[in-house]
Image (tube, coloured by chain):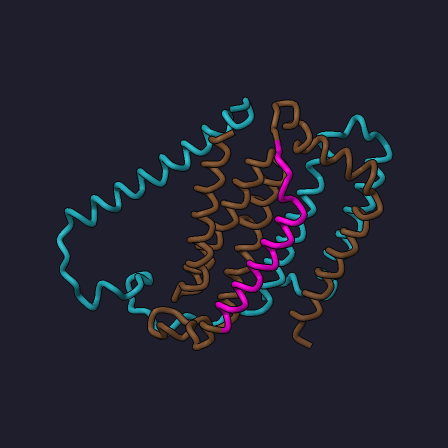
Amino acid sequence: MTEFYRSYLAVAVLILAAIGMVGFMLGLGRLIRPVRAQEQKYIPYEAGSDPTGTFGQSNVRYYVFALLFVIFDVEAVFIFPWAVNLESLGWFGLVEMTIFVVVLTLGLVYAWRKGVLRWA
Amino acid sequence: MWEQQVAFWVIAVAMAGAAIGVVRANNVVHAALFLIVVFAGSAAQYILLLAEFVAWVQVLIYIGAIIVLFLFGVMLTRAPMREERGKLDNSQRLASAVVALFLFGVLAVFLIDAFGGTELRFRDSMVEVGSAASVGDSIFRQFVIPFEVVSMLLLAALVGAVALARRD
């Protein structure tokens, strides 16, 4: 087994330990707790008062924020490989990255100017 | 090499089980949670292939962002919850089984045809290839134009979303 896999074995062990621990605690709780089913217990907790109906459909406006998040997440992914090569790429890399960021900023400016970023 | 094989099969079985969970879940939020397991499994497979950077991109983009998009989609549409159990189901099981088997067959035939005899022997020196530094090297030295085209693609997605979400 190579050194690379060995270093990720620690990650695998951590994940398995986490799953095992949570499974053990939930399983133990299920084994030893008393079960007295009551209708009231299955109502979602909503700040002490009974919930009113099903959940409401949220506004499509919030979806833009999720999509903005995805797009700038993708941008961040491209910034990482540039950042680790910052010195070897020099000015050329800086210009390339500036163009990339400016193009995406245009989209943000468009969204802002169209007023979809307002919460009201 | 056997450790890698064992890891591959463990992850692959977990992914397949979670993928079945995605389509079988009665609650769309549970389906999204199963999807996280599938994405995490594919990230682990990338690690096995020494593609470290791609693996963490998978975690960042798919688990971090795509699932958020899914949950927003669930909130936007009136997804069936507890009281409407069974509404996510339909009677297309046979058709979907045929499509799934057909897709599996096509993928299996083409992948075995293309890579059937290939045997990968990983060494520690290969870890470098999957790192962020070498990915950045090829993006900014060989694929500069595609990289800039990606920014246009993302801009198009952004403008499209804004156009859809506007009231007027």
Looking at the image, which residue is at 50% across and 73% down? B95
Queried whether the magenta region covers residue A77, the answer comes back as no
Counting from the top left corner in percent of width and height, residue A36 is at: 13, 60
Q: Based on the displayed image, in which of its 4 quarters is residue B163 positioned? A: bottom right
Counting from the top left corner in percent of width and height, residue A93 is at: 82, 35
Looking at the image, which residue is at 56% across and 36% down? B47
| The one of A85 and B39 positioned closer to us in this rendering | B39
| The one of A70 and A53 positioned closer to us in this rendering | A70
Q: Based on the displayed image, in which of its 4 quarters is residue A79 positioned? A: top right
Q: Is residue B25 left or right of residue A63?
A: left
The chain shown in cyan is which? A
Where is B127 relative to B46, above or below? above
Q: Chain B's shade in the image?
A: brown
Q: Quadrant of the C terminus of chain A?
A: bottom right
Counting from the top left corner in percent of width and height, residue B132 is at: 68, 33
The residue segment tinted magenta is B95-120
Where is B52 relative to A62, above or below? above
